[in-house]
Image (tube, helix red, strand yellow):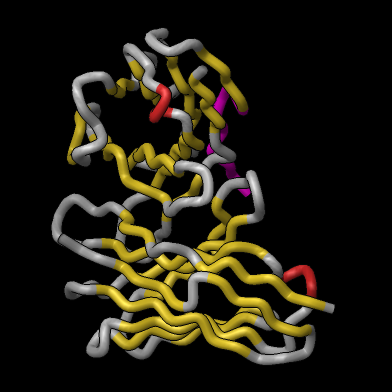
Amino acid sequence: EPEVTQTPSHQVTQMGQEVILRCVPISNHLYFYWYRQILGQKVEFLVSFYNNEISEKSEIFDDQFSVERPDGSNFTLKIRSTKLEDSAMYFCATRRGGLSYGYTFGSGTRLTVV
Amino acid sequence: ELKVEQNPLFLSMQEGKNYTIYCNYSTTSDRLYWYRQDPGKSLESLFVLLSNGAVKQEGRLMASLDTKARLSTLHITAAVHDLSATYFCAVDNNFGNEKLTFGTGTRLTIIP
């Protein structure tokens, strides 16, 4: 079964540093998303991406965050200057399109900001 | 703003018993999803419910959707230990830019 691949699985970074989280979507999927989950809490929407541009972003997705698909395959989330409260599990999700298809989530990147 | 509520938040049940997790949501939507999450792991898709009255079953789990009541249920039959996990429902807002809004999750513990 096709998978959404995320790297790294775990990243520890110092406060103020930039991080880039990477996702390789399923090849025929058209819609891409980033979600985050703070430990023990629910999953929160960050941003959706379609046709090489942001479709929607949440209040969490402020100027410190950006997404891009630099080479047509990888889908990246960049946090420019990390804060302690950015510590969370970040999930990439992709969707093929069409009403009957669901969302496939990647294995996640655990980001720890120290 | 779409709100999704689950109850209970925590559920501890004995093996062999039946129980139901409830998921209520606040605005019109025809698409509801159930996911399972083991500690420190990703979200595993369990069910995709796409219309009013949809019912799906997989093993000891059965999910249903009532769009008029804005309610979905996840029913567990004769629980076994390996069903212990956190279960999330999520609703797709189906107004143009689809995205999932998740419920708070139900942490299920099955006691031998």
Identify the residue shown where x is 21% and y is 73%. B26
Residue A64 seen from this side? yes
Q: Position of residue B80 (x, y in %)?
A: 78, 78
Q: Position of residue A7 (x, y in %)?
A: 57, 24
Q: Quadrant of the N terminus of chain B?
A: bottom left
Q: Quadrant of residue B104?
A: bottom left
* Magenta residues (range): A1-9
- Is A69 included in the stretch rendered in magenta? no
Q: Is residue A114 above or below residue B109?
A: above
Q: Is residue A96 above or below residue B4?
A: above
Q: Is residue B14 left or right of residue B70?
A: right
The secondary structure that dominates the magenta segment is loop
Residue A72 seen from this side? no
Q: Is residue A114 above or below residue B9?
A: above
Q: Nearer the viewer, residue B101 or A75?
A: B101
Please give the count of numbered marks on the rendered protein: 0
- Is A7 included in the stretch rendered in magenta? yes
Q: Quadrant of residue B30?
A: bottom left
Identify the residue shown where x is 41% and y is 73%. B6
